[in-house]
Amino acid sequence: MRRVVVTGLGAVTPLGVGVKRSWTNLLAGRSGVVSIRGRFPTVGSTEIPSQVAALVPGWDAGVWVSGAEKAKMATFTQYAVAAAEEALGDAGWRPESEEERSMAGVCIGSGIGSLDDVFNTAMSYAAGGYKKVPPIFIPRLLVNLAAGHVSMRYGFLGPNHAVSTACTTGAHSIGDATRFIQHGDANIMLAGGSESCIHPLALSGFCRVKSLATAWNDDPAAASRPFDRDRAGFVIGEGAGIVVLEELEHAKRRGARVYAEVRGYGLSADAHHMTAPPESGRGARMAMRKGLVQAGVRPREVDYVNAHATSTVLGDAAENRAVRGLLLGEEGWGRAGEVCMSSTKGATGHLLGAAGAVEAIFTILAVHEDILPPTLNLGNPGNPADTEDAAAADEFDCNYVPNVAQRKTVNVAISNSFGFGGTNASLCFSKLR
């Protein structure tokens, strides 16, 4: 099987535009969660119980696309284009021949796509009918247009693929792209996820299923608190993460810098519930185990887990149980305190379809720089006292890297992503062997 390495990184996140800015702010313990009171003129928007979100700060589309291009691109596509440009520049590669372009592809997805376009066009249609629907409506709306625009921009003629699997999208995109390279469909892939759907309709929908944090509107930076006893829902976020994946020998021939190797990719289904995981964390554990088996890695060799942990009561508990069950098993660590996992969503909120890709980048950097990013707002790990599972508080005994980054040699790391519909993915990265 052909080996796949990561040679470029690009990101647009609530911590800043660009990987360096995002990573620096993450390690410094800064939060990208802000108040959105008064941001939307939509009728009823002030009645939405959650008034916080993780917005991309200082976004200027004109830095990355022309005026004509901007008109054709929804915001999630603009984010993807910006992250792809940074990733390719970081990798130091551009195709110079038809043959190179034929072996270069794109795999970029989104969980929701352009909700703004759906809402605004529906309102225009309701007010004025057929002629009020702009001809660019469908091309801006489609989830695969982020990949399409990136492919057209660089002339990549290889796989042009888009994933849409809710909050697992970014991880699935990277895993699928890895397999395209392993099976010879491409030598280089741009892969990741992008999302921009912070809109009253999305906020209302997630609030109606009781997913969003609503108790921290007056203290936004404290709202996203993975693994903490006071956690009470996720914070919606936006952004994009794109990685350059490359066949190892191809990377060696051009003298590319390698951040990490993609060792394994595990997938599973909960087959349980539309929005809630099983308490046992069965599906999450299965995805991780499959990824490690593919990687040829024993549980004890996993130095760090970047958890999906979104700051929901059920989700964090289930994932914690899954990670402990796998990494403290027969071939695992001897003590729970030796299991190191953190959730970077404490700083970024939950980027939905982009989450898995951005968090994969943070995991890759943890491997590359031997540092564990922190879980913000974590003062008291466990389950809320008023939950049926409160007695399981003693299970929250791992090293969750609370509030401050930690130095540690990271040879192998896992990045987890789980989504509505019970879809799970786990990516395993390591230092190049």
Image: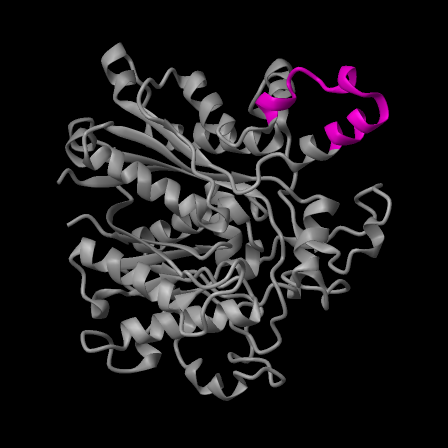
At x 51%, y 80%, the residue is 382
Question: Looking at this view, is 21 or 414 the one in front?
Answer: 414
Give the left or right position of residue 18, taking residue 286 as reference: right
Q: Is residue 202 above or below residue 123?
A: below
In the image, residue 124 lies in the stretch drawn in magenta = yes
Q: Is residue 15 above or below residue 402?
A: above
- Give percent across and percent down for residue 318: 45, 71
- Give percent across and percent down for residue 293: 19, 58
Q: Quadrant of residue 172?
A: top left
- Give percent across and percent down for residue 298: 18, 66
At x 70%, y 58%, the residue is 208
Q: Main secondary structure of the magenta part?
A: helix
Q: Is residue 115 above or below residue 399?
A: above
At x 40%, y 18%, the residue is 154
Q: Is residue 129 above or below residue 122?
A: above
Question: Looking at this view, is 412 or 256 the one in front?
Answer: 412
Viewer can see residue 52: yes
Q: Residue furthest top?
A: 98
| Count of labels in the image | 0
- Give percent across and percent down for residue 301: 21, 66
Viewer can see residue 11: no
In the image, residue 117 lies in the stretch drawn in magenta = no
Give the left or right position of residue 253, taking residue 316 as reference: left
Q: Quadrant of residue 286?
A: bottom left
Q: Quadrant of residue 312?
A: bottom right
At x 25%, y 17%, the residue is 100
Give the left or right position of residue 304, taking residue 232 as reference: left
Q: Which residues are magenta?
A: 120-140
